[in-house]
Amino acid sequence: MREYLLCLLAAAAVTYLTTPLVERLARRLGVIAEVRDRDVHDRATPRLGGLAMLFGLLAGLLLASKLPMMGAVFQSGGAPLALLSGVFVIVILGIADDKWGLDAPVKLAGQVLAAGLMAFQGIAVIWLPIGGTFVLDPLTSVLFTVLIVLVSINAINFVDGLDGLAAGIVAVAAGGFFAYSYLLSVELGVERATLATLVSVLLVGMCLGFLPHNAYRARIFMGDTGSMMLGLLLAAATITLSGQIDPSAVAGPTLLPAVLPILLPVAVMAIPLIDLFGAVIRRTRAGRNPFAPDKEHLHHRLLEMGHSQSRAVLLMYAWTGLVAGSAVALAFFPLPIAIGGFVIGLALILVAVRRPARPKLAAVRPLRTGTDG
């Protein structure tokens, strides 16, 4: 645990210290989110915050490569290189989109390229815990991996709509994923889970280091550079754990841990996934492009109910923590205790949602502040 904590602190510190430098760079290059009719922010705000997160990721990986336990991750195969190849492609794509605004087909092609690079280099779903162990053929493995990465990238991109929202949700989700993958890799000796554990803890550090600059009122946005990279890293952690862990190696107080490698990734991504699929269905039914921006995301609806931006963000954090935490609890506690905790948490959040801190104002336009759709 000590080495993981050191990696988290390194990623957080480097991200925090480099964000002001990236902010100045973004202003100099003109990578600015201007105020538009469909936005909430009332001042031009730099993008490119994801670049500082990249520096945090690299610092954490560099430190991990020098640590005794973590060093094994870098000696056992090419997974770190595969991860970085996908990250660099997605960061270049994000920088271009933040600067010039790329068309959806171009962005999709870049995302497929990043996912494909990782898949062909070994970060791919090998089998699924369905009916025991269902082994995927090479082509299906690559295609399924690319699909997971695309969904994860766009889910985080869509949820990046309020100051601090995406960074906080990813931090909470990655924290839950870290807890479970740490249990597998350290407590149960599942060696393949180590990379997933490392990526998860670095995600927490990167997001915590960025949040002081991105919380309301944000001085910098992560942009697509950040949101797409976070989505790709979450997907990589999911794939290296869920798609490569033999379900027969997982045991616990209930039968559910055997299916947790599938359940947990869905749980930690539940809120972004609900927002993503809801937006796609909503826009498709209206005959619009599923990637065309609108003002009906989950966070917009919280604003419509009268919640402030900060309170809406905290409620989204709470939803993510409840779902992810309940899924992780299934690996540690008997089913009745896990369900009981979920019910209590759900009741508390519903009370908070129905009681906004301020009365609903008809004139308020609940529009996004981020750079996603």
Image (spheres, rainbow, N blue to C red):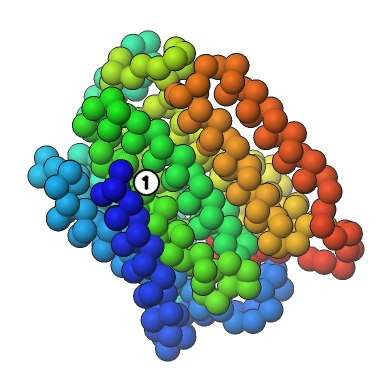
Q: Nearer the viewer, residue 193 or 41?
A: 193
Asked which quadrant contains residue 123, the reply is top left
Per the image, the residue denoted by label 1 is 200
Indicate the position of residue 265 as horizontal and vertical percent values: 45, 35
Tell me residue 297's x, y (percent).
67, 52
Residue 277 appears in the rendering: no
In the image, taking residue 28 as reference, residue 293 lies left or right, namely: right
Task: Say if 48 sits above or below 226 in the image.
Answer: below
Residue at the farthest bottom position: 28
Q: Is residue 235 above or below residue 333?
A: below
Q: Residues within 10 Å of mark 1 (few under 14, many from 20)?
A: many
x and y, in percent, of residue 281 in the image: 64, 41
Residue 14 higher or lower than 146, as above or below? below
Splitting the image into 4 quarters, where does residue 236 fall?
top left
| Residue at 31% over, 62% down | 10
Q: Residue furthest front?
A: 2
User: Where the N terminus falls, by quadrant?
Assistant: top left
Image quarter (top left, top right, bottom left or bottom right) of the C terminus: bottom right
Total labels: the figure holds 1
**Nearer-the-camera pick, 289 or 281:** 281
Residue at horizontal 14%, vertical 47%?
68
Name the amino acid type tagged 1: Ser
Determine if residue 255 is in view: yes
Seen in the image, is 82 located left or right of residue 34?
left
Q: Residue at x 45, y 24 (%)?
A: 331
> Residue at the spot x=64%, y=81% of the render?
43
